Image (cartoon, grey):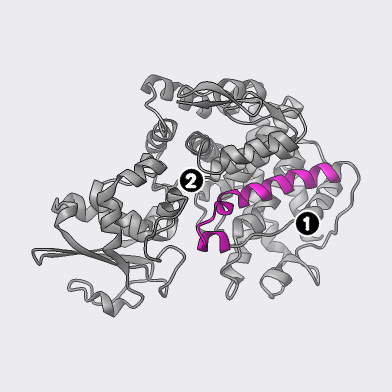
Amino acid sequence: MSVSEILAELAVDTPSQAIPRSSRDAAAKMLLDTCGCAFCGMEAPGIPELIDLEHELGAVGNASVYFHEMKMALPSAVLCNAAMIHALDFDNNYNHADIHIMSIVVPIAFACCEATGDSGHNCLNAIILGVESASRIAKPYVRARRSHKYFLTTSLVGGWGGVATAARLLGLSTKQTVHAMGIYYAHTCGNRQALLERALTKRIQPAIAAKAAIYSVLLAQRGISGPEFVFEGKAGFYACYTRDPSPPEEEFASPAISAVQELSVKQFPTCGVHHANIASALYLKHEQGFTCEQIKRVEFFLNEGGGTLVSMPFALSKIPQIDAQFCAPYAIALALNKGRVAITDFNPQQILDDQNTLDLAQRTSEHARFANMRLKHYSQPRPGYKYTKVTLHDGRVFEHEHPSAPLNDPSAMNLAQVRDKFKQCVSMYAEVDPGVSEHLADAILDFEDVSSVSEFIAAILRKTPIRRPFKNKGHTKYRE
Protein backbone atom coordinates (compact mmCIF):
# COMPACT_ATOMS: atom_id res chain seq x y z
CA MET A 1 0.00 0.00 0.00
CA SER A 2 1.09 3.56 -0.62
CA VAL A 3 1.44 5.88 2.36
CA SER A 4 -1.50 7.92 1.02
CA GLU A 5 -3.68 4.83 0.99
CA ILE A 6 -2.68 3.92 4.55
CA LEU A 7 -3.56 7.42 5.73
CA ALA A 8 -6.77 7.51 3.69
CA GLU A 9 -7.95 4.28 5.30
CA LEU A 10 -7.08 5.69 8.70
CA ALA A 11 -9.13 8.80 7.97
CA VAL A 12 -12.29 7.39 6.44
CA ASP A 13 -12.46 3.73 7.55
CA THR A 14 -11.52 3.91 11.25
CA PRO A 15 -14.65 2.96 13.22
CA SER A 16 -15.81 5.25 15.98
CA GLN A 17 -15.31 2.55 18.61
CA ALA A 18 -11.59 2.34 17.75
CA ILE A 19 -11.06 5.83 19.18
CA PRO A 20 -10.27 5.52 22.90
CA ARG A 21 -12.03 7.56 25.57
CA SER A 22 -8.71 9.13 26.52
CA SER A 23 -8.38 10.62 23.03
CA ARG A 24 -11.94 11.96 23.17
CA ASP A 25 -11.28 13.62 26.51
CA ALA A 26 -8.05 15.14 25.22
CA ALA A 27 -9.84 16.39 22.11
CA ALA A 28 -12.55 18.06 24.22
CA LYS A 29 -9.91 19.91 26.24
CA MET A 30 -8.11 21.01 23.08
CA LEU A 31 -11.40 22.10 21.52
CA LEU A 32 -12.06 24.37 24.49
CA ASP A 33 -8.61 25.87 24.09
CA THR A 34 -9.08 26.31 20.33
CA CYS A 35 -12.42 28.07 20.71
CA GLY A 36 -10.84 30.38 23.27
CA CYS A 37 -8.15 31.27 20.75
CA ALA A 38 -10.88 32.15 18.24
CA PHE A 39 -12.39 34.60 20.74
CA CYS A 40 -9.12 36.44 21.34
CA GLY A 41 -8.21 36.40 17.63
CA MET A 42 -11.48 37.74 16.28
CA GLU A 43 -10.20 41.30 15.86
CA ALA A 44 -6.45 40.76 15.82
CA PRO A 45 -4.59 42.90 13.26
CA GLY A 46 -5.14 41.52 9.79
CA ILE A 47 -8.21 39.41 10.58
CA PRO A 48 -10.95 41.98 9.82
CA GLU A 49 -9.21 42.82 6.55
CA LEU A 50 -9.00 39.16 5.58
CA ILE A 51 -12.68 38.64 6.31
CA ASP A 52 -13.63 41.74 4.33
CA LEU A 53 -11.71 40.46 1.32
CA GLU A 54 -13.23 36.98 1.46
CA HIS A 55 -16.68 38.51 1.85
CA GLU A 56 -16.03 40.62 -1.22
CA LEU A 57 -14.58 37.84 -3.37
CA GLY A 58 -16.02 34.62 -1.96
CA ALA A 59 -19.27 32.86 -2.69
CA VAL A 60 -22.17 32.56 -0.28
CA GLY A 61 -22.35 29.09 1.24
CA ASN A 62 -23.21 26.99 4.26
CA ALA A 63 -20.29 27.72 6.58
CA SER A 64 -20.28 30.41 9.26
CA VAL A 65 -17.57 32.98 9.80
CA TYR A 66 -17.21 33.09 13.56
CA PHE A 67 -18.66 36.15 15.31
CA HIS A 68 -20.11 37.51 12.05
CA GLU A 69 -23.65 37.29 10.75
CA MET A 70 -22.60 35.80 7.43
CA LYS A 71 -22.04 32.47 5.77
CA MET A 72 -19.54 31.70 3.02
CA ALA A 73 -18.50 28.81 0.84
CA LEU A 74 -16.47 26.26 2.79
CA PRO A 75 -12.96 27.29 1.63
CA SER A 76 -13.56 30.99 2.38
CA ALA A 77 -15.07 30.40 5.82
CA VAL A 78 -12.30 27.94 6.72
CA LEU A 79 -9.65 30.48 5.73
CA CYS A 80 -11.16 33.21 7.91
CA ASN A 81 -11.76 31.00 10.93
CA ALA A 82 -8.38 29.28 10.84
CA ALA A 83 -6.62 32.65 10.67
CA MET A 84 -8.68 33.87 13.61
CA ILE A 85 -7.73 30.86 15.74
CA HIS A 86 -4.01 31.11 15.00
CA ALA A 87 -3.78 34.91 14.96
CA LEU A 88 -2.27 35.36 18.42
CA ASP A 89 -0.11 32.22 18.31
CA PHE A 90 -1.87 31.07 21.47
CA ASP A 91 -3.18 27.81 19.97
CA ASN A 92 -1.82 24.36 20.68
CA ASN A 93 1.76 23.20 20.84
CA TYR A 94 2.74 19.81 19.41
CA ASN A 95 6.28 19.32 20.55
CA HIS A 96 6.87 16.04 18.70
CA ALA A 97 5.52 17.30 15.38
CA ASP A 98 5.98 21.10 15.43
CA ILE A 99 2.49 21.85 14.12
CA HIS A 100 -0.41 24.08 15.22
CA ILE A 101 -2.82 21.42 14.01
CA MET A 102 -6.05 22.40 15.80
CA SER A 103 -6.19 25.72 13.95
CA ILE A 104 -6.53 23.69 10.75
CA VAL A 105 -8.69 20.68 11.59
CA VAL A 106 -11.26 22.40 13.82
CA PRO A 107 -12.48 25.07 11.37
CA ILE A 108 -12.54 22.45 8.60
CA ALA A 109 -14.55 20.02 10.74
CA PHE A 110 -17.02 22.69 11.82
CA ALA A 111 -17.53 23.94 8.26
CA CYS A 112 -18.08 20.44 6.88
CA CYS A 113 -20.60 19.64 9.60
CA GLU A 114 -22.51 22.82 8.89
CA ALA A 115 -22.72 21.74 5.26
CA THR A 116 -23.86 18.20 6.05
CA GLY A 117 -25.84 18.68 9.28
CA ASP A 118 -23.59 16.28 11.17
CA SER A 119 -23.32 15.73 14.93
CA GLY A 120 -20.72 16.66 17.50
CA HIS A 121 -19.78 12.99 17.96
CA ASN A 122 -18.90 12.51 14.31
CA CYS A 123 -17.21 15.90 14.17
CA LEU A 124 -14.96 15.07 17.14
CA ASN A 125 -14.03 11.75 15.51
CA ALA A 126 -12.92 13.59 12.37
CA ILE A 127 -10.89 16.12 14.38
CA ILE A 128 -9.10 13.32 16.26
CA LEU A 129 -8.29 11.44 13.05
CA GLY A 130 -7.12 14.63 11.34
CA VAL A 131 -4.67 15.22 14.17
CA GLU A 132 -3.57 11.59 13.96
CA SER A 133 -2.95 11.74 10.21
CA ALA A 134 -0.97 14.97 10.39
CA SER A 135 1.15 13.72 13.28
CA ARG A 136 2.19 10.57 11.40
CA ILE A 137 3.44 12.69 8.51
CA ALA A 138 5.02 15.41 10.64
CA LYS A 139 7.02 13.37 13.13
CA PRO A 140 9.41 11.77 10.61
CA TYR A 141 9.67 15.09 8.79
CA VAL A 142 10.72 16.91 11.97
CA ARG A 143 13.28 14.20 12.74
CA ALA A 144 14.77 14.41 9.25
CA ARG A 145 14.76 18.19 8.98
CA ARG A 146 18.29 19.48 9.30
CA SER A 147 19.27 22.31 6.98
CA HIS A 148 15.64 23.19 6.26
CA LYS A 149 14.77 24.96 9.51
CA TYR A 150 13.01 27.83 7.77
CA PHE A 151 10.17 25.74 6.38
CA LEU A 152 6.96 26.10 8.40
CA THR A 153 5.84 22.63 9.44
CA THR A 154 2.25 23.63 10.19
CA SER A 155 1.72 24.83 6.64
CA LEU A 156 3.65 22.01 5.01
CA VAL A 157 2.06 19.13 6.87
CA GLY A 158 -1.00 20.39 8.70
CA GLY A 159 -3.10 20.55 5.55
CA TRP A 160 -2.98 16.78 5.18
CA GLY A 161 -4.64 16.55 8.58
CA GLY A 162 -7.30 18.87 7.22
CA VAL A 163 -7.75 16.64 4.19
CA ALA A 164 -8.29 13.63 6.46
CA THR A 165 -10.84 15.52 8.56
CA ALA A 166 -12.84 16.83 5.60
CA ALA A 167 -12.72 13.54 3.67
CA ARG A 168 -14.28 11.68 6.60
CA LEU A 169 -17.05 14.21 7.16
CA LEU A 170 -17.90 14.70 3.49
CA GLY A 171 -18.10 10.94 2.87
CA LEU A 172 -15.21 10.45 0.47
CA SER A 173 -14.10 6.94 -0.39
CA THR A 174 -10.59 5.74 0.34
CA LYS A 175 -9.63 6.23 -3.32
CA GLN A 176 -11.07 9.75 -3.41
CA THR A 177 -9.17 10.58 -0.22
CA VAL A 178 -5.94 9.37 -1.81
CA HIS A 179 -6.61 11.75 -4.69
CA ALA A 180 -7.37 14.58 -2.26
CA MET A 181 -4.03 14.03 -0.53
CA GLY A 182 -2.33 14.14 -3.92
CA ILE A 183 -4.12 17.36 -4.84
CA TYR A 184 -3.11 18.93 -1.54
CA TYR A 185 0.53 18.16 -2.27
CA ALA A 186 0.31 20.69 -5.10
CA HIS A 187 -0.56 23.32 -2.46
CA THR A 188 2.09 22.38 0.10
CA CYS A 189 4.03 25.48 1.11
CA GLY A 190 5.01 27.55 4.10
CA ASN A 191 8.10 29.32 5.40
CA ARG A 192 9.29 31.45 8.29
CA GLN A 193 10.26 34.58 6.37
CA ALA A 194 7.12 36.36 7.54
CA LEU A 195 8.17 35.67 11.12
CA LEU A 196 11.66 37.00 10.47
CA GLU A 197 10.15 40.22 9.10
CA ARG A 198 7.32 40.39 11.67
CA ALA A 199 4.69 40.36 8.91
CA LEU A 200 0.99 39.55 9.26
CA THR A 201 1.41 36.72 6.76
CA LYS A 202 2.66 34.57 9.62
CA ARG A 203 -0.76 34.37 11.22
CA ILE A 204 -2.54 33.34 8.03
CA GLN A 205 -0.18 30.62 6.76
CA PRO A 206 -1.98 27.78 8.59
CA ALA A 207 -5.23 29.25 7.25
CA ILE A 208 -3.90 29.08 3.71
CA ALA A 209 -3.14 25.39 4.30
CA ALA A 210 -6.62 24.82 5.73
CA LYS A 211 -8.29 26.46 2.73
CA ALA A 212 -6.16 24.39 0.36
CA ALA A 213 -7.05 21.22 2.25
CA ILE A 214 -10.82 21.65 2.00
CA TYR A 215 -10.50 22.79 -1.62
CA SER A 216 -8.48 19.64 -2.41
CA VAL A 217 -11.19 17.44 -0.89
CA LEU A 218 -13.93 19.22 -2.86
CA LEU A 219 -11.95 18.71 -6.08
CA ALA A 220 -11.43 15.02 -5.38
CA GLN A 221 -15.12 14.65 -4.57
CA ARG A 222 -15.82 15.92 -8.09
CA GLY A 223 -13.49 13.44 -9.76
CA ILE A 224 -10.26 15.42 -10.05
CA SER A 225 -7.31 13.07 -9.69
CA GLY A 226 -4.14 13.58 -7.74
CA PRO A 227 -0.88 11.63 -7.55
CA GLU A 228 -0.84 8.69 -5.16
CA PHE A 229 2.80 8.45 -4.14
CA VAL A 230 3.07 11.97 -2.74
CA PHE A 231 5.11 10.87 0.27
CA GLU A 232 7.44 8.14 -0.99
CA GLY A 233 7.67 9.09 -4.68
CA LYS A 234 10.78 10.28 -6.50
CA ALA A 235 9.43 13.83 -6.26
CA GLY A 236 7.46 13.11 -3.10
CA PHE A 237 7.23 15.15 0.08
CA TYR A 238 10.13 13.58 1.98
CA ALA A 239 12.46 13.60 -1.05
CA CYS A 240 11.72 17.27 -1.73
CA TYR A 241 11.59 18.65 1.78
CA THR A 242 14.14 16.52 3.62
CA ARG A 243 16.17 15.00 0.75
CA ASP A 244 15.95 11.74 2.69
CA PRO A 245 14.13 8.54 1.74
CA SER A 246 10.54 8.20 2.84
CA PRO A 247 10.07 6.48 6.22
CA PRO A 248 8.95 2.84 6.12
CA GLU A 249 5.23 2.19 5.67
CA GLU A 250 4.97 0.72 9.17
CA GLU A 251 5.53 4.17 10.66
CA PHE A 252 2.22 5.34 9.20
CA ALA A 253 0.18 2.22 9.99
CA SER A 254 -0.04 2.03 13.79
CA PRO A 255 -3.45 0.93 15.13
CA ALA A 256 -3.18 3.36 18.07
CA ILE A 257 -5.21 6.58 17.89
CA SER A 258 -3.36 8.71 20.42
CA ALA A 259 -1.79 11.77 18.77
CA VAL A 260 -4.41 14.19 20.10
CA GLN A 261 -3.30 13.19 23.61
CA GLU A 262 0.18 14.52 22.79
CA LEU A 263 -1.02 18.07 22.13
CA SER A 264 -0.27 20.65 24.80
CA VAL A 265 -1.98 23.90 25.69
CA LYS A 266 0.11 27.04 25.44
CA GLN A 267 0.55 28.90 28.71
CA PHE A 268 1.84 32.14 27.20
CA PRO A 269 0.67 33.93 24.01
CA THR A 270 4.14 34.08 22.50
CA CYS A 271 6.43 31.89 20.43
CA GLY A 272 7.14 28.72 22.43
CA VAL A 273 10.91 28.93 21.97
CA HIS A 274 11.32 31.28 24.92
CA HIS A 275 8.54 30.06 27.23
CA ALA A 276 11.07 28.62 29.69
CA ASN A 277 12.75 32.03 29.93
CA ILE A 278 9.37 33.59 30.66
CA ALA A 279 8.83 30.99 33.39
CA SER A 280 12.23 31.85 34.89
CA ALA A 281 11.47 35.56 34.79
CA LEU A 282 8.15 35.00 36.56
CA TYR A 283 9.88 32.88 39.20
CA LEU A 284 12.50 35.57 39.89
CA LYS A 285 9.89 38.33 39.98
CA HIS A 286 7.67 36.50 42.47
CA GLU A 287 10.54 35.22 44.63
CA GLN A 288 12.55 38.45 44.84
CA GLY A 289 9.84 41.09 44.47
CA PHE A 290 12.03 43.67 42.70
CA THR A 291 10.46 46.41 40.61
CA CYS A 292 11.05 47.14 36.98
CA GLU A 293 12.84 50.40 37.87
CA GLN A 294 15.37 48.49 40.01
CA ILE A 295 16.55 46.37 37.06
CA LYS A 296 19.73 47.48 35.36
CA ARG A 297 19.83 44.77 32.69
CA VAL A 298 18.50 41.32 31.82
CA GLU A 299 20.41 38.59 30.00
CA PHE A 300 19.11 35.29 28.71
CA PHE A 301 20.36 32.14 27.00
CA LEU A 302 18.08 30.07 24.77
CA ASN A 303 20.49 27.14 24.44
CA GLU A 304 19.83 26.96 20.69
CA GLY A 305 22.99 28.35 19.17
CA GLY A 306 22.06 32.01 19.29
CA GLY A 307 20.31 34.22 16.81
CA THR A 308 16.94 32.46 16.85
CA LEU A 309 13.79 33.89 15.30
CA VAL A 310 12.78 35.46 18.61
CA SER A 311 16.09 36.64 20.04
CA MET A 312 16.47 39.83 18.01
CA PRO A 313 16.40 43.14 19.93
CA PHE A 314 12.96 44.57 20.49
CA ALA A 315 11.79 47.29 18.11
CA LEU A 316 8.34 48.71 17.41
CA SER A 317 6.91 48.64 13.92
CA LYS A 318 3.44 49.21 12.49
CA ILE A 319 2.24 45.96 14.10
CA PRO A 320 3.20 46.12 17.80
CA GLN A 321 1.32 42.93 18.60
CA ILE A 322 3.60 40.84 16.40
CA ASP A 323 6.67 42.78 17.55
CA ALA A 324 5.87 41.78 21.13
CA GLN A 325 4.74 38.19 20.56
CA PHE A 326 7.79 37.11 18.64
CA CYS A 327 10.46 38.83 20.69
CA ALA A 328 11.98 37.09 23.69
CA PRO A 329 13.37 40.35 25.15
CA TYR A 330 9.87 41.82 25.24
CA ALA A 331 8.16 38.77 26.76
CA ILE A 332 10.85 38.39 29.43
CA ALA A 333 10.64 42.10 30.24
CA LEU A 334 6.85 41.86 30.49
CA ALA A 335 7.13 38.99 32.98
CA LEU A 336 9.66 40.89 35.09
CA ASN A 337 7.60 44.06 35.02
CA LYS A 338 4.08 42.79 35.62
CA GLY A 339 4.67 39.36 37.12
CA ARG A 340 2.44 37.85 34.44
CA VAL A 341 2.29 37.27 30.69
CA ALA A 342 -1.41 37.31 29.86
CA ILE A 343 -3.29 37.50 26.59
CA THR A 344 -4.69 40.93 27.47
CA ASP A 345 -1.14 42.26 27.68
CA PHE A 346 -0.89 41.76 23.91
CA ASN A 347 -3.69 44.09 22.98
CA PRO A 348 -1.88 46.52 20.60
CA GLN A 349 -2.83 49.62 22.59
CA GLN A 350 -1.83 47.94 25.83
CA ILE A 351 1.64 47.30 24.38
CA LEU A 352 2.04 50.93 23.32
CA ASP A 353 0.87 52.21 26.72
CA ASP A 354 3.17 49.94 28.76
CA GLN A 355 6.24 52.14 28.83
CA ASN A 356 7.94 50.24 31.65
CA THR A 357 7.98 47.01 29.64
CA LEU A 358 9.05 48.83 26.48
CA ASP A 359 12.00 50.37 28.31
CA LEU A 360 13.03 47.14 30.05
CA ALA A 361 12.89 45.25 26.76
CA GLN A 362 15.64 47.56 25.52
CA ARG A 363 17.77 46.46 28.48
CA THR A 364 17.14 42.75 27.79
CA SER A 365 19.42 40.79 25.47
CA GLU A 366 20.45 37.28 24.47
CA HIS A 367 23.86 35.69 24.82
CA ALA A 368 24.63 33.23 22.06
CA ARG A 369 27.37 31.60 24.17
CA PHE A 370 26.59 30.23 27.61
CA ALA A 371 29.99 31.30 28.98
CA ASN A 372 29.12 34.93 28.31
CA MET A 373 26.25 34.72 30.77
CA ARG A 374 28.86 34.53 33.60
CA LEU A 375 26.47 32.67 35.84
CA LYS A 376 27.53 32.00 39.42
CA HIS A 377 25.16 29.13 40.22
CA TYR A 378 25.09 27.26 36.90
CA SER A 379 28.45 26.16 35.54
CA GLN A 380 27.27 24.26 32.46
CA PRO A 381 24.10 24.46 30.37
CA ARG A 382 21.83 21.46 30.53
CA PRO A 383 20.14 20.23 27.34
CA GLY A 384 16.63 21.59 27.05
CA TYR A 385 17.12 24.25 29.74
CA LYS A 386 16.91 28.03 29.31
CA TYR A 387 18.71 30.55 31.50
CA THR A 388 17.74 34.02 32.71
CA LYS A 389 19.85 36.51 34.67
CA VAL A 390 18.67 39.78 36.23
CA THR A 391 21.13 42.44 37.43
CA LEU A 392 19.81 45.25 39.63
CA HIS A 393 21.19 48.78 39.88
CA ASP A 394 22.31 48.09 43.46
CA GLY A 395 24.57 45.26 42.25
CA ARG A 396 22.45 42.29 43.25
CA VAL A 397 22.24 39.50 40.67
CA PHE A 398 19.56 36.82 40.36
CA GLU A 399 19.81 33.74 38.16
CA HIS A 400 17.46 30.94 37.24
CA GLU A 401 17.31 27.94 34.93
CA HIS A 402 14.11 26.37 33.66
CA PRO A 403 13.53 23.27 31.51
CA SER A 404 11.40 23.59 28.38
CA ALA A 405 9.95 20.08 28.54
CA PRO A 406 7.40 20.62 31.34
CA LEU A 407 5.89 23.57 29.47
CA ASN A 408 5.32 21.35 26.43
CA ASP A 409 3.93 18.42 28.38
CA PRO A 410 0.29 17.60 27.56
CA SER A 411 -0.44 17.37 31.29
CA ALA A 412 1.09 20.78 32.10
CA MET A 413 -2.32 22.45 31.85
CA ASN A 414 -5.17 20.54 33.46
CA LEU A 415 -8.79 21.11 32.50
CA ALA A 416 -9.37 23.68 35.24
CA GLN A 417 -6.38 25.70 34.01
CA VAL A 418 -7.60 25.48 30.42
CA ARG A 419 -10.97 26.80 31.57
CA ASP A 420 -9.20 29.74 33.21
CA LYS A 421 -7.27 30.41 30.01
CA PHE A 422 -10.55 30.26 28.07
CA LYS A 423 -12.07 32.92 30.33
CA GLN A 424 -9.06 35.18 29.72
CA CYS A 425 -9.38 34.72 25.96
CA VAL A 426 -13.10 35.52 25.98
CA SER A 427 -12.29 38.73 27.89
CA MET A 428 -9.52 39.81 25.52
CA TYR A 429 -11.28 42.99 24.46
CA ALA A 430 -13.75 43.66 27.30
CA GLU A 431 -14.77 42.17 30.64
CA VAL A 432 -17.27 39.31 30.40
CA ASP A 433 -19.52 38.08 33.16
CA PRO A 434 -17.85 34.97 34.67
CA GLY A 435 -21.15 33.11 34.52
CA VAL A 436 -21.30 33.65 30.76
CA SER A 437 -17.75 32.35 30.34
CA GLU A 438 -18.56 29.28 32.44
CA HIS A 439 -21.65 28.58 30.36
CA LEU A 440 -19.64 28.83 27.13
CA ALA A 441 -16.92 26.53 28.49
CA ASP A 442 -19.48 23.95 29.64
CA ALA A 443 -21.16 23.96 26.23
CA ILE A 444 -17.87 23.42 24.42
CA LEU A 445 -16.81 20.59 26.72
CA ASP A 446 -20.17 18.90 26.01
CA PHE A 447 -19.62 19.23 22.26
CA GLU A 448 -19.49 15.48 21.65
CA ASP A 449 -23.12 15.18 22.74
CA VAL A 450 -24.60 17.88 20.49
CA SER A 451 -26.88 16.59 17.76
CA SER A 452 -26.19 19.48 15.37
CA VAL A 453 -22.86 21.24 14.95
CA SER A 454 -24.72 24.01 13.10
CA GLU A 455 -26.80 24.76 16.18
CA PHE A 456 -23.69 24.65 18.37
CA ILE A 457 -21.91 27.21 16.19
CA ALA A 458 -24.97 29.46 16.10
CA ALA A 459 -25.13 29.40 19.90
CA ILE A 460 -21.42 29.63 20.74
CA LEU A 461 -19.46 31.12 17.82
CA ARG A 462 -21.92 33.13 15.75
CA LYS A 463 -22.42 35.69 18.50
CA THR A 464 -20.22 37.01 21.26
CA PRO A 465 -21.17 38.46 24.64
CA ILE A 466 -18.56 41.20 24.40
CA ARG A 467 -19.64 43.11 21.30
CA ARG A 468 -22.40 45.25 19.96
CA PRO A 469 -22.92 44.99 16.17
CA PHE A 470 -21.94 47.60 13.65
CA LYS A 471 -22.02 47.58 9.88
CA ASN A 472 -18.89 47.49 7.78
CA LYS A 473 -18.73 46.88 4.03
CA GLY A 474 -22.12 45.29 3.95
CA HIS A 475 -21.79 42.79 6.79
CA THR A 476 -22.16 42.75 10.54
CA LYS A 477 -19.16 42.56 12.82
CA TYR A 478 -18.83 43.07 16.56
CA ARG A 479 -16.93 45.59 18.59
CA GLU A 480 -17.05 47.00 22.08
| Nearer to us: label 1 or label 2 | 2
Q: Which corner quadrant of the image does residue 381 belong to?
A: bottom left
Left or right relative to 162: residue 360: left
On-image quarter of the C terminus: top left
- Say which element carries label 1: helix
- Amino acid type, callout 1: Ser
Residue that sits furthest to the right in the current view: 223
Nearer to the camera, 374 or 448: 374
Q: Which mark is residue 88?
A: 2
Residue 79 lies, with reference to residue 447, above or below; the image says below
- Say which element carries label 2: loop
Residue at x-position 47% and y-position 48%: 264
Q: Which residues are magenta?
A: 193-219
Which residue, given by chain and number where applicable, does mark 1 sit on?
4
Left or right relative to 288: residue 145: right
Residue at x-position 64% and y-position 36%: 52
On-image quarter of the N terminus: bottom right
Q: Which mark is residue 334?
A: none
Circle count: 2
Residue 318 belongs to magenta span: no
Nearer to the camera, 7 or 138: 138
Residue 348 lies, with reference to residue 427, above or below; the image says below
Left or right relative to 2: residue 104: left
x and y, in percent, of residue 60 in the image = 76, 29
Residue at x-position 75% and y-position 39%: 168
Q: Main secondary structure of the magenta part?
A: helix
Residue 111 lies, with reference to residue 245, above or below; the image says above
- Amino acid type, callout 2: Leu
Residue 213 belongs to magenta span: yes
